[in-house]
Amino acid sequence: MHAADGFVAIRDIAPKADTHLLVLPERHVASFREISEFPADEAKRMLDFVAETAKVAGLDDYRLVVNVGEGAGQTVFHLHWHVLGRDAHAQEPHTADTAVSEL
């Protein structure tokens, strides 16, 4: 869907929103707990890439979710960001409680 040096964005195979993307660093890091393994410039590039991915997907308003640990619902142990957005023509708004419980 979108790629840049060291990062990739793909569509989630089980979407929980009209637009549900996953942003992953190519470098393996098990979870957000290990974010300090990224040098500061690479961490900034990752956040810039997350924002750019949302823009490329046509999202003005969106949510970012990172599940950290099994107890929080993390099932894939490679750091990734969920970018969730709604179709501008959708009728029912998602609530944060609903969306997070579905991830």
Image (cartoon, grey):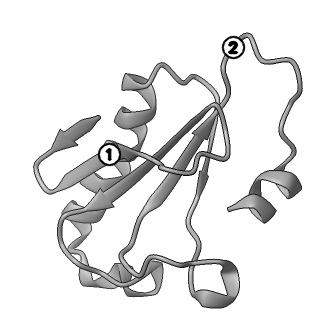
Measured as percent of width and height from the top left, residue 8 is found at 24, 49
Residue type marked 1: Ala
Based on the displayed image, in which of its 4 quarters is residue 88 positioned?
top right
Query: Which quadrant of the rendered structure holds the C terminus?
Result: bottom right
Quadrant of residue 11 within the rendered picture: top left
Residue at numbered disc 2: 88
Q: Residue furthest front?
A: 13
In the picture, measured across the screen, residue 97 lies left or right of residue 57, that is right
Q: Which residue is mark 1?
A: 9
Classify 10 Å Cα crowding around label 1: few (below 14), some (14-19), many (20 and above): many
Residue 33 placement, left or right of 97: left
Residue 12 in percent (x, y) is at 47, 49
Whether pointer 1 and pointer 2 mark residues with C-beta atoms closer than 8 Å, the reply is no
Residue 38 image point, x, y percent: 24, 75
Quadrant holding the N terminus: top left
Residue placed at 83% from the left, 39% from the top?
94
Report the residue at 64% width, 31% height from top.
18
Q: Which mark is residue 31?
A: none
Between residues 83 and 45, which one lies in front from this camera angle?
83
Amino acid type at circle 2 is: Ala
Question: Closer to the camera, 4 or 11?
Answer: 11
Question: Where is 42 relative to 56, above or below?
Answer: below
Helix, strand or loop at label 1? It is strand
